[in-house]
Amino acid sequence: MSENKHKVIYLNYNLHKNNAEGELIESTKEQQPLVFLTGKGQMIPEFEAQVENLKKGDKFSFGIKAENAYGEHTEEAIIELPKDMFMQEGQLPKEVSVGNVLPLQSQDGRVHPGKVVSINENTITMDMNHMLAGQDLHFTGEIIDVREAEKEEIEHGHVHGEGGHQH
């Protein structure tokens, strides 16, 4: 970590599977830059460590192994849920179909995407692994801007103003 652990970083990136030549997973090219506040756990720790000391205009290219990104794909994250939790007016909504990703809310109110694996007689099997679990990642991109975080941003734990309130 740098001496000032709270910076606001604006960057554009391309995310590829495995290496820089791998399949493109995600890009900010046609969108707004990614904006985040360092030191608040908003990003994959290794991603933040790679970009936190870069300056405006710096380019980057680095890989992150699956275990340091979204973790390995685990069987514990494949769960059975009662089918009746998905029913609406006595019917299973068409969105609840094998292969679809559904937003599921945990008891603490957080939303976690889960992929429908199978629809059984009384249960629905969901894969709650992150979609990129088990996947090595490679990021390339450029730092658009870096600034010191404001006191309120640090206290609130997110960026204010342009590109802010994302997290």
Image (cartoon, grey):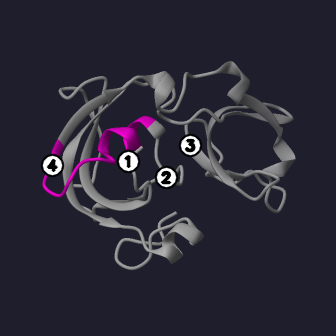
Asked whether disc 4 touches disc 3, contact meaning CB atoms under 8 Å apart, the reply is: no
Left/right of residue 124 with respect to residue 99 in the rendered view: right
Q: What's the amino acid at mark 3?
A: Asn
Q: Which callout, 3 or 1, points at the residue further toward the start of the chain?
A: 1
In front: label 4 or label 3: 4
Q: Secondary structure at mark 1?
A: loop
Measured as percent of width and height from the top left, residue 97 is found at 62, 42
Q: Secondary structure at mark 2?
A: loop
Q: Residue at position x 70%, y 55% from top? A: 110
Can the viewer see residue 134? no
Q: Is residue 46 above or below residue 54?
A: above
Asked whether disc 3 touches disc 1, contact meaning CB atoms under 8 Å apart, the reply is: no
Q: CA distance from mark 1 to mark 4?
A: 17 Å
Measured as percent of width and height from the top left, residue 111 is found at 66, 54
Give the number of the disc on residue 2: 1
Q: Which residues are magenta?
A: 46-59
Q: CA distance from mark 4 to mark 2?
A: 20 Å
Give the number of the disc on residue 39: 2
Tag 4 residue: 58
Q: CA distance from mark 2 to mark 1?
A: 10 Å
Q: Which callout, 1 or 4, points at the residue further toward the start of the chain?
A: 1
In front: label 2 or label 1: 1
Disc 3 residue crowd, few under 14, some 14–19, many 20+, Cα 10 Å: some
Q: CA distance from mark 3 to mark 2?
A: 34 Å
Give the number of the disc on residue 100: 3
Q: Secondary structure at mark 3?
A: loop
